[in-house]
Image (cartoon, rainbow, N blue to C red):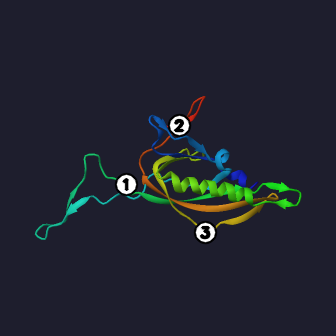
Amino acid sequence: MSLMGKWNNFFLQRMGEASPGTPYPVCESASTWGILCKTIPFKIIDKVKEPAKRSYFDEHGDDEYISPGGLFLESYNMRVQFGCKRIDSDKYGSSVDDVREKVGSFISYLRTAGMMKMYSSHTRIGRQNVRLVSINDNAVWKTDDDQEYLVFEVDFKVNDPITDVVLTTSSSSEEYE
């Protein structure tokens, strides 16, 4: 089984509008940057926020306010593992320039996009209000089936842990609902 054969495609979209009434385009990871995803730990539900409360010295327990909408969820961080295949450039060996360019372009997008929508084609889970937190410095080259891959990790913060973003496709484009 090939190392990259277990990896999956994912989609990103900068939130907001490129121009009035026109959302930013959805970027497919493989075709846009040549990058695939190994792990993407979208949580079904995470930690619940503490409700607003007051404690009085002359009463037992706390007075807690639970909104009519119920309890709210905390934002959370997730670490996503990505990979980019090294392409042979000539008969003398492989060049890392193509990987450096692809990964550099991907990181530039993450850094400049601000808040994004993210969707995993494997888990079929998507979230909005996702932003870059950090790029881990533990990138490594892995070899499988005589192919080399740069494997690296990125930390994201999910500020909206409840809204489920769904990728829809039409004959002309891809968009989120």
Residue 63 image point, x, y percent = 18, 60
Number of the front mark, 2 or 1: 2
- Label 3 sits on what residue type? Asp
**Residue 137: quarter of image:** bottom right
Q: How far apart are marks 2 and 1 (CA)?
A: 26 Å
Q: Could you say which is closer to the camera, residue 94 or residue 38?
A: 94
Residue 41 is at least partly visible in this image: no
User: To which residue does mark 3 refer?
Assistant: 137
Where is residue 87? Give x, y as percent.
Answer: 78, 54
Point out residue 108 in the picture as x, y percentages from the top left corner: 58, 56
* Mark 3 → mark 2, Cα distance in angstroms: 32 Å
Q: Are marks 3 and 2 in contact (CB under 8 Å)?
A: no
Which structural element holds mark 3? loop
Front-lying residue, 149 or 39: 149
Observer-side mark, 1 or 3, equals 3
Q: Residue at x 71, y 57 (%)?
A: 99
Q: Which residue is drawn at 22% across and 58% down?
A: 64
Q: Is residue 2 left or right of residue 173?
A: right
* Vertical order, 165 against 171 (above or below): below
**Closer to the camera in the image, 117 or 75:** 117
Picture layout, residue 81 above or below residue 167? below
Mark 1–mark 3 contact, CB under 8 Å?
A: no
Q: Looking at the figure, which quarter contains the N terminus? A: bottom right
Q: Which of marks 1 and 3 is nearer the N terminus?
A: 1
Judge whether 138 appears above or below 27 on screen. below
Label 2 sits on what residue type?
Glu
Alpha-carbon neighbours of circle 2 within 10 Å: few (<14), some, or many (≥20)? Answer: some
- Helix, strand or loop at label 1? It is loop
From the image, tell me which residue sits under label 2.
175
Residue behind mark 1: 73
The numbered disc on residue 115 is: none
Residue type for callout 1: Leu
